[in-house]
Image (cartoon, coloured by chain):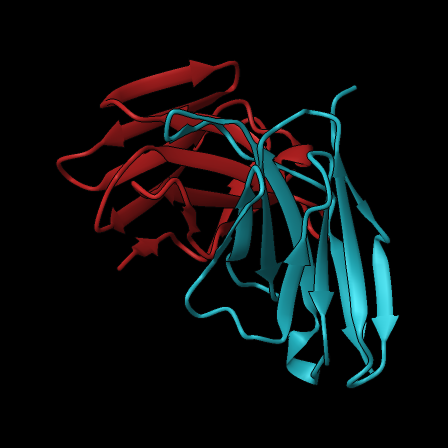
Amino acid sequence: GQNIDQPTEMTATEGAIVQINCTYQTSGFNGLFWYQQHAGEAPTFLSYNVLDGLEEKGRFSSFLSRSKGYSYLLLKELQMKDSASYLCAVRALSNNLFFGTGTRLTVIP
Amino acid sequence: DAMVIQNPRYQVTQFGKPVTLSCSQTLNHNVMYWYQQKSSQAPKLLFHYYDKDFNNEADTPDNFQSRRPNTSFCFLDIRSPGLGDAAMYLCATSWRDRGKSDTQYFGPGTRLTVL
């Protein structure tokens, strides 16, 4: 089975840095994805990790530790438009994606 | 721009009245997925097509069917919608080669309301 946990909600200030954690327990692991989803819209791809370590892409970075079943998404220089839900998804050996329920981030001025 | 397109964006149907949701893609991906996402919940995979091979998830109700007439199009048919089927339906695509899948790209979704 698959179990993916994320905090339900977070609030951070414009210009700050925020870290969104994701822990997972899966019967097989074939990569971890982060998606951003604005209310009422489709998820959009942010990042992908399959090996341990940090992947940086502009203001967004994602970290993976396979031995700990742990990942985080780091958002720097927060902007108001970053207010959204952030979904952690684990790809199983079947190639199917299993999503967490998402972390709703609110950026305040 | 290459993309995943879903029509309609909003669909209203009546309890028990069959409804079809449409997805098309210009990415030329060989895998197409359908997800159901209810409010404040994670997207849940219903089924996917790998080329012409249909792969149903074990807990997908029989009420949900899918068709893929060609590479570009995939349809979700709900034979007898119930109130519990009201949700956002997301189509996604990816490229799979030799058993390994790339990133999934999502369409904008169709929000289904059942009256």
Q: Colour of chain A?
A: red
Depicted B12 relative to depicted A31: above or below: below
Front position in the image: B97 or A28:
B97
Among the 4 quarters of the image, the one containing residue B94: top right
Residue A10 x, y percent position in the rendering: 48, 49
Front position in the image: A53 or B38:
B38
Quarter of the N terminus of chain B within the rendering: top right
Residue B4 x, y percent position in the rendering: 73, 35
Front position in the image: B40 or B96:
B96
Depicted A95 relative to depicted B38: above or below: above
Residue A68 x, y percent position in the rendering: 15, 39
Residue A43 appears anywhere in the view: no
Q: Residue at x 33, y 53 (%)?
A: A4
Quarter of the C terminus of chain B within the rendering: bottom right
Among the 4 quarters of the image, the one containing residue B59: bottom left
Q: Residue at x 57, y 63 (%)?
A: B40
Residue B54 located left or right of residue A29: right
Q: Colour of chain B?
A: cyan
